[in-house]
Image (tube, rainbow, N blue to C red):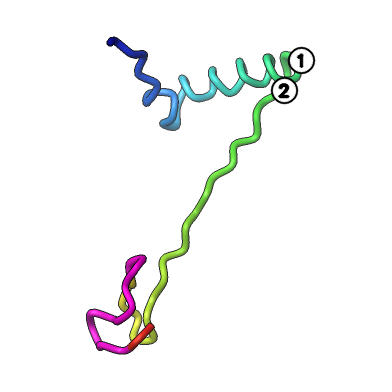
Amino acid sequence: MDGFDLTKYQEEGEDKDKIRKIMGKVLSGRSDYEVAEEKKVEKQRRCDCGWPIESGQKFCQECGTKC
């Protein structure tokens, strides 16, 4: 089954701006409305020693303390 690749619309650039304007017009009915994009930033957990801790880890790989 062939699909339509949408990854070029996810990256910053001219194509993404076109899609934002189209979606704004579809959702609001006005041509001057643009969709507000929500960007999710995940904060990485760190141990007291500063070593990054991945999800699911209970102990620090660097110093061995329980986190």
**Residue at x 39%, y 75% (from the top left corner):** 46
Is label 2 in a helix, a strand or a loop?
loop
Q: The disc labelled 2 sits on which kind of residue?
A: Tyr
Q: Position of residue 7 (x, y in %)?
A: 37, 26
Q: Position of residue 20 (x, y in %)?
A: 58, 23
26 vs 45: above or below: above
Q: Is residue 18 left or right of residue 44?
A: right
Q: Is residue 61 magenta?
A: yes
Name the residue furthest left: 62
Find disc 1 in the rendering and name its residue: 30
- 44 or 56: which is nearer to us? 56
45 vs 38: above or below: below
Find disc 2 in the rendering and name its residue: 33
**Residue at x 41%, y 66% (from the top left corner):** 44
Q: Is residue 58 left or right of residue 16?
A: left
Q: The disc labelled 1 sits on which kind of residue?
A: Arg
| Occupied quadrant, residue 57 | bottom left
Q: Quadrant of the C terminus?
A: bottom left
Q: Position of residue 11 (x, y in %)?
A: 41, 31
Q: Is residue 35 left or right of residue 5?
A: right
| Occupied quadrant, residue 5 | top left
User: 10 Å neighbourhood of mark 1: few (<14), some, or many (≥20)?
Assistant: few
Q: Quadrant of the N terminus?
A: top left
**Residue at x 37%, y 81% (from the top left corner):** 47
Magenta-colored segment: predominant secondary structure: loop
User: Magenta span covers which residues?
Assistant: 54-65
Q: Are marks 2 and 1 in contact (CB under 8 Å)?
A: yes
35 vs 55: above or below: above
Label tally: 2
